[in-house]
């Protein structure tokens, strides 16, 4: 076996790169998941909306509360600056850091255990480790791989500096340590592990330790102060949760099991089972043997394992009981080395049994590789992520269930989403997420009476909540009782403003609905005012409301030209608001005081057309859409619906004309452009 590893030694780095790339190659095409969009992609400090400089990332709470990881956010910032919000680029960089940290680990282990074969096999296990998927595929966890790379480099240079007494290497070690703790808080444990290393392997020089470890302490204390300042009173740690000793013990058991057999892979919660105790007792016995036999390597591995997990065990903090697999990243190093040592021990014991002696190596490689391949698709997109989390959680959780229900809703699975809403209401009768999910599902299913009943129950359960009034407004909008819808919306807004918890996000809910009602009423002036407020507060058009100010007190032709020019210049997800405004302006100009009545009639006609399509009467639906377009040349919903109707009945020439008509109004409509390209149709507006 040693001969095999001697041959491998020539190509070890290449083998690690190929193995890591082979395993994680599919993830290059994965999407952003969980909180990648709000925390990274839509973060104004990262995506260029705010004009910032490099040093601002080191200001506490500048980027995001509850974490202080400036180096990680600088990496995010650079990726977005160079490649844009490109999921491929983010995944590629994350995999690069993971493979790089594995290579750094190999050099580190060669220094610690002085046995190349054991060190290399341990790194093979490390790179295949299933629990590392979370930090290598989830963009928001990239900081763990960045910190681990710097952690290993700092440790490596400390050993070189300590053994060779070279000041330059010592400086490198300290610099890498600073980079590590500024990438992810887990790196704060390094000084304790360095002390443990000196105690286990250089005990005769223990007195020299103080001068070597001293430089790390000030940076550690400064970082802890900044980190504490960042997380204090954070919304993410505001909820106080009390955990029993048994629950805390089970967390340790969970980590212990995952160190060897990563069976319960879950981004959120794990099953707390009595079988953990079966692993804890042997582990305590193992500790006794280690101490009794004075085995330096085993002492170091067990000690570093415990030190690495210490911040996550929730021993001193009742409101923290962390169960995520990414917290095993450093502790797993000890586990991988122990497994590697065990495999080589088996190999030595079974010298005469050639087949069996190789099994100890391949069983872990096959186990880890197969588990990783099976688990990777979970992180493909939000749908697979939340479905897996919901189905594999040991307890029903409000956040997981509501996120899963939203995914079902977005995927058109309204009955299933409604059932999840029922589950949420059962979990807590005062759980607004359950009611909201249920109401949305029922409205999508057109079960209006049931939606009204649920909304009434919502109002009764939480009379102080403004959301029930908000959804009564939506129900009346669905019923085309627009005046009643506006009444409920104003009442909801009045109730919302009374509470300190009222946020900008809540305000956006009202603004969007107000604009929708002004659109129905063809009230272009009120629509412009609402657009201005939304632009100013939510960077809707990234202009602080300046666009809307330009529109005020101008004649129709000027307003029309301004809106059309905006659509020609910009490719924005908010272009729909400009299209709605164009429709309002046209109605007001064409029908004067009758505009609201005519607009409402047009929307009723739109609903009739949809009913005709359901019945298979495509000709009647076509006639209605053509009539609507003749009365309002900017009502893009009718163009869209008619275009897709033509596609369904294989009238591609007419579809081409309608879709190009949309591009005349909005030349940057990428969806329509892509449809035309896919169908091989002509695109006149490039």
Image (spheres, rainbow, N blue to C red):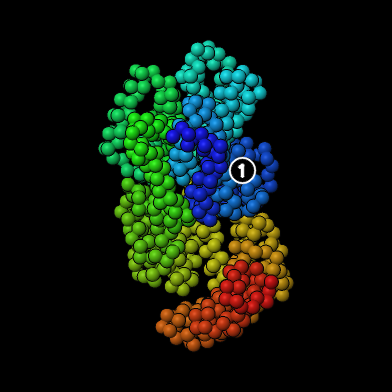
Does the image show residue 260?
yes
Q: Measured from the top left, where is residue 574 in percent x and y?
A: 60, 63
Q: Which residue is at the front of the view, 438 or 258?
A: 258
Q: Measured from the top left, where is residue 649 in percent x and y?
A: 50, 83
User: To which residue does mark 1 refer?
Assistant: 75
* Image: 263 above or below 116: below
Q: Quadrant of the N terminus?
A: top left
Identify the residue shown where x is 68% and y is 57%: 543
Does the image show residue 497?
no
Q: Quadrant of the C terminus?
A: bottom right
Looking at the image, residue 595 sits to the left or right of residue 114; the answer is right
**Residue 599, quarter of the rendered image:** bottom right
Other residues around mark 1 within 10 Å, as few (<14) / some (14–19) / many (≥20): some
Identify the residue shown where x is 52% and y is 29%: 110
Identify the residue shown where x is 46% and y is 79%: 610
**Residue 12, quarter of the rendered image:** top right
* Image: 591 above or below 115: below
Q: Which residue is at the front of the view, 612 or 148?
A: 148
Q: Measured from the top left, where is residue 361 in percent x and y?
A: 40, 39
Identify the residue shown where x is 56% and y is 65%: 515
Q: Which residue is at the front of the view, 122 or 224?
A: 122
Name the residue furthest front: 352
Q: How many labels does the image show?
A: 1
Q: Measured from the top left, where is residue 129 in percent x and y?
A: 44, 41
Secondary structure under tag 1 reads helix
Q: Which residue is at the front of the view, 191 or 501?
A: 191
């Amino acid at each position: 076996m040693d001969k095999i590893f001697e041959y491998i030694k020539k190509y070890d780095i290449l083998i690690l790169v190929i193995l890591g790339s082979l395993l994680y190659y599919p993830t290059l095409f994965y999407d952003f998941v969980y909180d990648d969009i709000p925390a990274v992609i839509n973060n104004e400090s990262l995506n260029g909306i705010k004009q910032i400089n490099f040093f601002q990332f080191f200001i506490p709470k500048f980027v995001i509360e509850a974490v202080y990881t400036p180096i990680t956010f600088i990496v995010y910032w650079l990726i977005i600056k160079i490649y844009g919000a490109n999921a491929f680029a983010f995944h590629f960089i994350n995999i690069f850091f993971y493979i790089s940290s594995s290579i750094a680990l190999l050099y580190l282990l060669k220094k610690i255990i002085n046995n190349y074969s054991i060190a290399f096999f341990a790194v093979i296990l490390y790179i295949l480790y299933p629990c590392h998927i979370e930090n290598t595929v989830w963009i928001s966890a990239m900081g763990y791989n960045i910190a681990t790379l710097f952690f290993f480099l700092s440790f490596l240079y400390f050993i070189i500096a300590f053994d060779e007494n070279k000041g330059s290497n010592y400086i490198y070690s300290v610099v890498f340590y600073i980079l590590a703790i500024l990438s992810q808080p887990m790196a704060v444990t390094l000084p304790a592990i360095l002390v443990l290393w000196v105690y286990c392997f250089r005990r005769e020089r223990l007195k020299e330790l103080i001068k070597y470890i001293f430089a790390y302490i000030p940076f550690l204390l400064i970082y802890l102060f900044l980190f504490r300042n960042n997380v204090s009173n954070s919304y993410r740690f505001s909820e106080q949760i009390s955990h029993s000793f048994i629950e805390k013990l089970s967390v340790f058991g969970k980590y212990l099991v995952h160190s060897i057999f990563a069976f319960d892979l879950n981004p959120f919660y794990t099953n707390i089972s009595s079988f953990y105790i079966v692993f804890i007792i042997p582990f305590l016995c193992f500790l006794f043997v280690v101490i009794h036999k004075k085995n330096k390597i085993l002492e170091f591995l067990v000690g570093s394992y415990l030190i690495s997990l210490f911040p996550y065990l929730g021993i001193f903090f009742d409101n923290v009981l962390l169960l995520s697999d990414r917290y095993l990243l450093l502790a797993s190093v000890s586990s991988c080395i122990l497994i590697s040592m065990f495999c080589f021990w088996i190999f030595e014991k079974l010298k005469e049994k050639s087949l069996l002696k190789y099994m100890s190596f391949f069983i872990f490689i096959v186990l880890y590789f197969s588990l990783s391949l099976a688990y990777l698709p979970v992180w493909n997109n939000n749908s697979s992520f939340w479905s897996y989390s919901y189905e594999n959680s040991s307890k029903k959780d409000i956040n997981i269930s509501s996120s899963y229900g939203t995914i079902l809703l977005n995927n058109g699975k309204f009955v299933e989403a409604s059932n999840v809403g029922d589950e949420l209401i059962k979990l807590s009768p005062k759980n607004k997420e359950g009611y909201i999910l249920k109401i949305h599902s029922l409205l999508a299913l057109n079960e209006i009476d049931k939606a009204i009943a649920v909304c009434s129950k919502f109002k009764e359960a939480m009379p102080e909540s403004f959301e029930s009034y908000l959804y009564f407004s939506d129900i009346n909008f669905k019923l085309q009782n627009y005046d009643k819808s506006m009444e409920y919306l104003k009442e909801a807004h009045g109730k919302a403003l009374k509470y300190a918890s009222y946020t900008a996000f809540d305000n956006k809910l009202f603004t969007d609905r107000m604009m929708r009602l002004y659109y129905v009423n063809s009230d272009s002036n009120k629509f412009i005012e609402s657009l201005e407020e939304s632009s100013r507060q939510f960077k809707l058009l990234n202009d602080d409301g300046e666009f809307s100010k330009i529109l005020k007190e101008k004649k129709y032709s000027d307003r029309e030209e301004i809106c059309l020019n905006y659509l020609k210049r910009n490719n924005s997800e908010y272009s729909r608001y400009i299209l709605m405004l164009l429709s309002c302006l046209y109605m007001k100009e064409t029908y004067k005081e009758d505009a609201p009545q005519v607009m409402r009639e047009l929307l009723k006609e739109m609903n009739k057309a949809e009913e005709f399509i359901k019945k298979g009467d495509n000709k009647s639906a076509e006639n209605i859409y053509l009539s609507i377009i003749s009365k309002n040349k900017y009502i893009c919903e009718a163009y869209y619906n008619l275009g897709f109707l033509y596609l369904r009945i294989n009238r591609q020439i007419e579809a081409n004309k309608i879709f190009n008509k949309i591009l005349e109004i909005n030349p940057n409509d990428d969806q329509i452009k892509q449809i035309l390209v896919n169908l091989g149709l002509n695109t006149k507006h490039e």
